[in-house]
């Protein structure tokens, strides 16, 4: 095998964000751009002599090109083997499972998650460590530092590998193994859940609709929901993976998953004919949205409800060690943890902060408000896993999605919640908004805004309880005396300008108000957030781009 060392020049913009490096495809297509970043990853690691790399992506445009290139660079950088999903495709949770199941050294996942795909859209790459989880900040920072000084990269010279055929290709001390990751992942799900009870539910007339949004979960949903659980094939929609994700925006929320929403929200007189259960997953399969008949479950509630009912699921029947949620996620799960008498951790945004807690057996379940829920079965959030949690719980409780949520609120009170996103605003304007809010920190405490009076405010920082690492600047919180709060945060995953997120949460113990629409219940707080931040004045935006 001929190895080449290629001279290159550093790019200064390869800083990984909340979840790896994400840029427009055109940026990645610049000569040496992807190679530089991959070499920076390899240079940061101490690659063991017998190291195997897991590799796969969400199937978006540029996936195939990048996979072949990374295989050749892995060969030149000392890996003895690359395990790759058939067709170069692995959902993010499946990739995490492959790393753990085959005990590989680590993995490279190619994805820009829910961002649109195609030649003019987004691409992304991230490194996951041997525990199957996203590399912690100390590694991503080291990769960024390397990328700014890199002068050469190493690549082997051989023909592209056929990734469509399952099996192993031997190449002079190096091999590439193509696996059926779909069946590996389905086997894992079958171990965690009570498939026979879910199967009976689906045979008893309970109907579901799953929307893969033309992205990676299509084949996984077919194998699990149809082949193994017996749902009719018509239960699936948009399950053929396309390189452009059907030209859509595979983010499972009420705005972008409107095709599914239309199916579940039938006109009034036809609500009964809607499926009993609806779910969607995102580009790389780690996010989920759960719907009932004309009913939306907020991800924060979903986490809390799964936690409260976890013992109905075989994998968690012994109970939970603890739970964790990202800071902007609502406190609904905290109330469940209190009742279960288990610890609840509050981490910064991004899945990478949950890994240490899981490895140390401190938490079993975790989640984020951004449609991410997961458990210690892998080290990524997992869309289909969340769908199966809901189906398993419903199959045993024999209730509807709406009834389950309302019973939960009746027991614990409702954490009314919404997130308003202002996408692709000029970076300077976004920074001005954040600076303006912080400039009022000294005067906020004790101030009264309508029915809310401020208790404290801060810029959230986190000390990892396991390794002591500190992460600062994780979002501005204004905490009110009644337990309600407003959080302002800049996204770390966008590729155009800045995205400002406003997270709004109010606790409502009174069952008489539980039916209220979140936007109505939070109207006063939304106005306070706009006044405090001067957002309209700084950005000239009248309305959010997305409300969830
Ligand atoms: C967003 C979500 C965050 C999630 C991440 C990756 O990051 O808010 O919870 O972990 O995508 O899916 P953000 O754009 O807010 O930095
Ligand atoms: Zn994703």
Image (tube, rainbow, N blue to C red):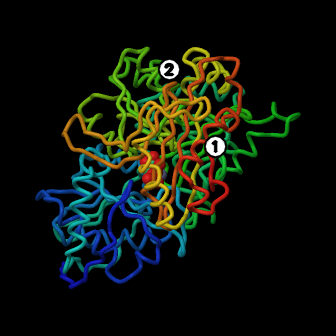
Mark 2 closeness class: few <14, some 14–19, many ≥20 residues within 10 Å: many
Q: Vertically, is 214 above or below 26? A: above
Front residue of this view, candidates 1 and 108: 108
Front residue of this view, candidates 234 and 548: 548
Q: In which quarter of the image is the N terminus?
A: bottom left
Q: Which residue is drawn at 34% across and 59% down?
A: 126
Residue 18 position by quadrant = bottom left
Front residue of this view, candidates 151 and 334: 334
Q: Which residue is drawn at 63% across and 60% down?
A: 541
Q: Vertically, is 125 above or below 237? A: below
User: Mark 2 to mark 1: distance in Å?
Assistant: 36 Å
Residue 393 position by quadrant = top right
Q: Vertically, is 396 above or below 517? A: above
Mark 1 closeness class: few <14, some 14–19, many ≥20 residues within 10 Å: few
Q: Vertically, is 461 above or below 58? A: above
- Can the viewer see residue 91? no
Residue 414 horizontal/vertical position (percent): 59, 24
* Residue located beneath label 1 in the image: 527
- Asked if residue 120 lies left or right of residue 368, the reply is right
The dot on residue 309 is 2
Does dot 1 land on a helix, a strand or a loop? helix
Residue 114 horizontal/vertical position (percent): 52, 56
Residue 207 horizontal/vertical position (percent): 70, 33
């Amino acid at each position: 095998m001929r190895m080449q060392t290629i001279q290159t020049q550093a790019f200064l913009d390869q800083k990984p964000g909340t979840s790896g490096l994400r840029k427009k495809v055109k940026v990645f297509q610049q000569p040496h751009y992807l190679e530089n970043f991959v070499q920076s990853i390899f240079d940061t690691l101490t690659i063991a002599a017998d190291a195997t790399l897991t590799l796969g992506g969400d199937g978006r445009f540029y996936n195939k090109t990048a996979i072949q290139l990374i295989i050749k660079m892995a060969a030149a950088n000392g890996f003895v083997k690359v395990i790759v999903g058939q067709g170069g495709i692995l959902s993010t949770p499946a990739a995490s499972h492959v790393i753990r199941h085959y005990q590989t050294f680590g993995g490279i996942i190619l994805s820009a998650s829910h961002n649109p795909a195609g030649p003019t859209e987004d691409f992304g790459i991230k490194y996951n460590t041997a525990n199957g989880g996203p590399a912690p900040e100390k590694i991503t920072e080291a990769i960024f530092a390397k990328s700014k000084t890199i002068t050469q990269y190493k690549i082997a010279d051989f023909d592209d590998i056929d990734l469509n055929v399952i099996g192993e290709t031997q190449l002079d001390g190096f091999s590439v193994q193509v696996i059926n990751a779909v069946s590996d992942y389905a086997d894992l799900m079958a171990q965690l859940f009570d498939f026979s009870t879910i199967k009976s539910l689906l045979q008893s007339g309970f109907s579901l609709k799953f929307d893969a949004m033309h992205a990676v979960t299509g084949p996984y949903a077919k194998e699990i929901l149809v082949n193994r659980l017996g749902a009719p094939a018509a239960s699936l929609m948009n399950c053929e993976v396309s390189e452009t994700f059907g030209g859509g925006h595979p983010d499972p929320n009420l705005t972008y998953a409107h095709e599914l929403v239309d199916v579940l929200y039938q006109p009034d007189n036809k609500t009964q004919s809607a499926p009993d259960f609806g779910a969607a997953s995102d580009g790389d399969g780690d996010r989920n949205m759960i719907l009932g008949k004309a009913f939306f479950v907020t991800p924060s509630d979903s986490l809390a409800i799964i936690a409260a009912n976890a013992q109905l699921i075989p994998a968690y029947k012994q109970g939970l060690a603890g739970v964790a949620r990202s800071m902007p996620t609502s406190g609904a799960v905290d109330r469940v943890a209190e009742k279960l008498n288990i610890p609840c951790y509050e981490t910064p945004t991004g899945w990478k902060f949950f890994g240490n807690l899981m490895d140390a057996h401190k938490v079993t379940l975790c989640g984020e408000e951004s449609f991410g829920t997961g458990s210690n079965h892998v080290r990524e959030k997992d869309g289909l896993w969340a769908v199966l949690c809901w189906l398993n719980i419903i199959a045993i409780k024999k209730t509807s999605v709406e009834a389950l949520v309302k019973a939960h609120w009746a027991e614990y009170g409702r954490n009314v919640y919404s997130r308003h996103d202002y996408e692709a605003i000029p970076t300077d304007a976004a920074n001005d908004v954040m600076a303006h809010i912080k400039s009022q920190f000294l005067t906020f405490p004790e101030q009264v805004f309508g029915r809310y009076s401020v208790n404290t405010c801060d810029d959230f920082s986190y000390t990892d309880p396991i390794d002591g690492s500190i992460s600062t600047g994780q979002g501005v919180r204004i905490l009110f005396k009644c337990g309600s709060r407003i959080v302002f945060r800049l996204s770390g995953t966008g590729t155009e300008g800045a995205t400002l997120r406003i997270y709004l949460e109010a606790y409502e113990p009174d069952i008489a108000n539980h039916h209220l629409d979140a936007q109505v219940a939070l109207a006063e707080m939304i106005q306070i957030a706009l006044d405090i931040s001067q957002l309209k004045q700084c950005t000239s935006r009248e309305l959010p781009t997305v409300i969830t």
